Image: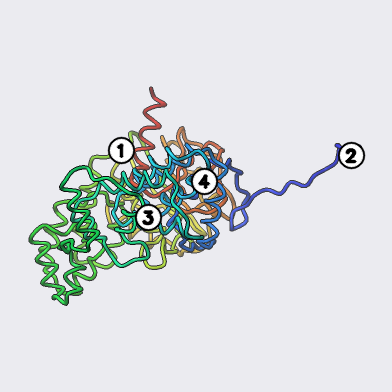
Amino acid sequence: MAKMNVWKPMFPVRTHEGAVAQKMDAKSELRRTVLTCLLWEDTFYEKGNDIAKRIAALAAENKPEVVAALAREARGKMQLRHAPLFLTRELARRQGTGRLVAETLEDVIQRADELGEFVALYWKEKKQPLAAGVKRGLARAFTKFDAYQLAKYDRESAVKLRDVLFLCHAKPRDQAQAVLWKKLVENTLEPPDTWEVALSTGKDKRENFERLLREGKLGGMAVLRDLRLMLASGVDPKLVRERLDQGVARALPFRFVTAARYAPRLEDALEKAMLKGIAGFAKLAGSTGLVVDVSGSMNYKLSKKGETTRMDAAAGLAILLREKADEFTIATFSDTCIELPPRQGFALRDAIVGSQAHSGTYLKRALRQLHDKAAWRELDRLIVITDEQSHDGILQAWTPRAYAVNVAPYKHGISYGNGWTHVDGWSERIVDYIAAVEAQAAA
């Protein structure tokens, strides 16, 4: 008989910087990875392919209902595009999930090009027949898009929109949609009036942008994304200001932070649009202390082709929290801990980014330093925004409410337990979440 009373070495999980991290269950680890992930994008510490493999493995460990709910949250609340499609693809690999796959796919496909993207993802390993639940989900999603949306994304790609239509056998809602789909199949859709189409025909960039702005045909997100190109083309800044003054729907705070970096002369208009967009969010009563990670890994871009860094995401959340908190105190940490004046808007972004050198991640040291100060000890809530790859771990929370907002998809984190409420993502929904949690506790 084998001996039972033997010593077994226990090896704790650690962050990439060596601090002891907390072990998570499969649901928490999947959520942590997905809600901070731009799929297949390399990060400071991990390769994008490794992150995707981890998501697939974790999706298989979780109940189908958990995976489906997370896919919906990632698309609807966190405004991620590829990770929800990938989750739904992994869900479709499982037996008996047809109904759930159909419902989830209908919800997470919110742009017409995502129809083809999902099929391309489904065929990534090998081309194979679509499952019945996938066909139903694609068919339902197809009916959501009008002529403009279909024409805009009817592009030369591996899987075209007409291919998806043939594969899923969608049924049109009415005769008008039947006529529209016939045009799609016959490649006779009217080209959409977008700047991309106009430029492809050789039209002048400035003239084209200005016309679309005057006619109200350029969306707020398009303005944010293409602001640098518009200004380089000589577009009248007055027209851009007028468009920004109308508001920008569904734009995450960091989108404005990134846009302002490349359009400093329009910073005031961008700031006004950003603050207008967050005016309706819930307030956080009492005193809030915010601690922002400005270590070197936070400077890493969210995607290879993009300009946004995790520090931009953190700065965007900081600006939002500054507006929503009744009383606000802020500090940054890297090798040291620096307290900042509670500025507003882009002035707060500048203070965060320029507060100190972007080097190590000594969170526990920073929290100890702040805990020694009476003003920080007496806060109603403490919020830390970080990628959690601390050298020295985290301190036990001392405020009545404490939140650690994770903005990276790394495997192990430090903010589970010890009085901290763990939150994943960089969406403005985080403020709503904190307000809802506290209201529920008060009730």
Tell me, yes or no, whether the two marked residues, 4 and 1, touch with CB atoms within 8 Å: no
Residue tagged 1? 326
Q: CA distance from mark 2 to mark 1?
A: 63 Å
Q: Position of residue 213 (x, y in %)?
A: 12, 62
Query: What secondary structure is found at the residue carrying circle 3?
Result: helix
Numbered circles on residues, count: 4
Query: Looking at the picture, which amino acid does disc 1 mark?
Result: Asp
Name the residue tied to disc 2.
2
Farthest residue, direction top: 443
Q: Earlier in the sequence, mark 4 or mark 3?
A: 4
Residue 313 is tagged as 3
Q: Residue 159 or 39: which is nearer the viewer?
A: 159
Q: Hey, which quadrant is residue 217 in on the image?
A: bottom left
Residue positioned 34% across, 38% down in the render: 432
Q: Which amino acid is tagged 3?
A: Ala
Q: Earlier in the sequence, mark 2 or mark 1?
A: 2
Among the two numbered marks 3 and 2 on one chain, the one whose residue lies closer to the N terminus: 2
Give the residue at mark 4. Answer: 30
